[in-house]
Image (cartoon, rainbow, N blue to C red):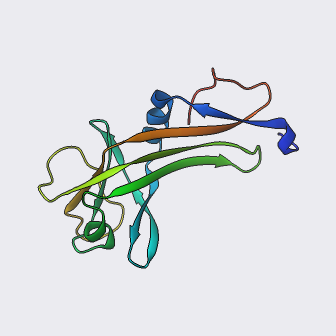
Amino acid sequence: MVDSAAGVRLEELDEDTCWRLVASVPVGRIAWNETGGPVVVPVNHVVADGAVVVRTGAWSGLERHVDDSDVAYEVDHLDEETREGWSVLVRGPAEVTYDGAGTHPEPWAGGARPVTVRVRPRSVSGRRLVGEGEGDARSGG
């Protein structure tokens, strides 16, 4: 266990590692802007064809506000005891479709989720907090 922040360092992650980490967890948060300000909601996802894919309900805020708009998708993991963890941010335009084609996650929440939202990455970045002595050889997740 690391006793202080002095025993933890921050390292940048390469894009391949970022995608591996995003694919390793089922839930992240998608953020977009509405007229009332930024909105962030948790959703489950899959990584498919170089994009983050989520499902949502018809007439949801997500469906109504993100098509052809820039969004951010964030996924992370944190161990509070060791103060180690990672965070990945995918930013780019969202595409809303209604055909249900392609790979998409099985929604966790009840109710119909007929709308697919794909986040096409314009940028992918990530950081990891690691204890001193740990390094790039450490596997993700």
Q: Can you name the residue that lies furthest to the left here?
A: 99
Residue 92 place in picture, x, y as percent: 36, 48
Please name whichever residue, 140 or 110, is drawn nearer the observer in this view of the structure. Answer: 140
Q: Residue at x 73, y 51 (%)?
A: 80
Q: Is 63 located above or below residue 84 in the figure? A: below
Q: Is 52 located above or below residue 116 in the figure? A: above
Q: Can you name the residue that lies furthest to the bottom here?
A: 36
Q: Residue at x 32, y 73 (%)?
A: 61
Q: Residue at x 38, y 77 (%)?
A: 35
Q: Is 18 located above or below residue 117 in the figure? A: above
Quadrant of the drawing holding the C terminus: top right
Q: Is 116 located above or below residue 112 in the figure? A: above
Answer with left or right where residue 28 lies relative to residue 5. left
Residue 58 place in picture, x, y as percent: 21, 71
Residue 139 place in picture, x, y as percent: 58, 27
Residue 128 place in picture, x, y as percent: 64, 37
Residue 87 placement: quadrant: top right
Please name whichever residue, 23 or 71, is drawn nearer the observer in this view of the structure. Answer: 71
Answer with left or right where residue 41 lies relative to residue 6. left
Q: Residue at x 47, y 31 (%)?
A: 15
